[in-house]
Amino acid sequence: MGMAEPVQEWPDARRKEALRAERTESYVSTQGRLTTPQMATHGQAPRVAACVYIGVGSNLGDRMSHCLAAVDALDRLDRTRLVAVSPWYETEPVGAAAPGDFLNGVVGLETDLEPRALLEACLAIERERGRARAAREGPRTLDLDLLLYDDRVVDEPGLTVPHPRMAERAFVLLPLADIAPRAVHPVLGCTVAVLRSRLSDRHAVRLYQSSWSSAV
Ligand code: GSY
């Protein structure tokens, strides 16, 4: 029997902090996927993490603080790295039972978490911000929607990827197109930019804050 190949480990917490400080380091992007030089070890090919987009929304309380807390919490997830944050938009609510304008944006991550684990992490972040999921379309302190996970198609109880309504929603497609116009919807077979150009959603969507970093 040959020697077992060394298993590639994700960085521990301290190493992750150091990597965070190096975040401005360049990425190599191929086909919408991102390889991170820091993940390459033992002379093996660089690991290719999944490229994921998550919709962030809030229409209750201090909306910007909920959204920024979500960005921070997503950035802190294990085996996950923050890649992009869209501008923030103030958006008219879609759905009768959701009074009050939303703040919406989209976050790009690369992650080694599987879709179900990422969903559970998102639900935990929502709970931390006081979100109760009693009413499906009621006001919410924080809503995190898994929009795209690489080119994966998932249809399981409680987990549908791509998000089933993302192609109809201006509050999703405008911020998503800002950071990932060339990402491909694996079911519809077209890019986010094309989906955006075909939008018929007439709910108001106004740019609220173009720069994430200026808010912190
Ligand atoms: O699906 C996300 C929650 N949500 C939103 C939202 O985030 N923004 C807007 N504008 N309307 C919404 N209706 C629901 S439900």
Image (cartoon, rainbow, N blue to C red):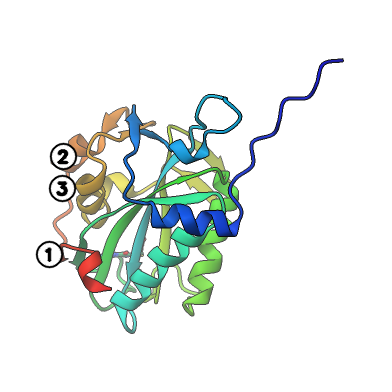
Q: Amino acid at mark 3?
A: Ser
Q: Nearer the viewer, mark 1 or mark 3?
A: 1
Q: Is residue 209 above or below residue 189?
A: below
Q: Secondary structure at mark 2?
A: loop
Q: Is residue 14 above or below residue 110?
A: below
Q: Position of residue 77 (x, y in %)?
A: 53, 58
Q: Nearer the viewer, residue 90 or 211?
A: 211
Q: Position of residue 155 (x, y in %)?
A: 53, 40
The answer to whether mark 3 is within 8 Å of ligand 1 is: no
Q: Nearer the viewer, residue 49 or 3?
A: 3
| Badge 1: residue crowd in 10 Å (few <14, some 14–19, many ≥20) | some
Q: Nearer the viewer, residue 56 or 108?
A: 108
Q: Residue 52 vs residue 90: left or right?
A: right
| Badge 3: residue crowd in 10 Å (few <14, some 14–19, many ≥20) | few
Residue that carries the numbered disc 3 in the rendered image: 200
Q: Nearer the viewer, residue 16 or 128?
A: 16
Q: What residue occupies the far bottom of the structure in this picture? A: 61
Residue that carries the numbered disc 1 in the rendered image: 206
Identified at 82% across, 16% down, the residue is: 2
Q: Quick one: label 1 or label 2, which is nearer the N terminus?
A: 2
Residue that carries the numbered disc 2 in the rendered image: 198
Q: What residue occupies the far right of the structure in this picture? A: 1
Identified at 31% across, 40% down, the residue is: 26
Q: Amino acid at mark 2?
A: Arg
Q: Are marks 3 and 2 in contact (CB under 8 Å)?
A: yes
Q: Quick one: label 1 or label 3, which is nearer the N terminus?
A: 3
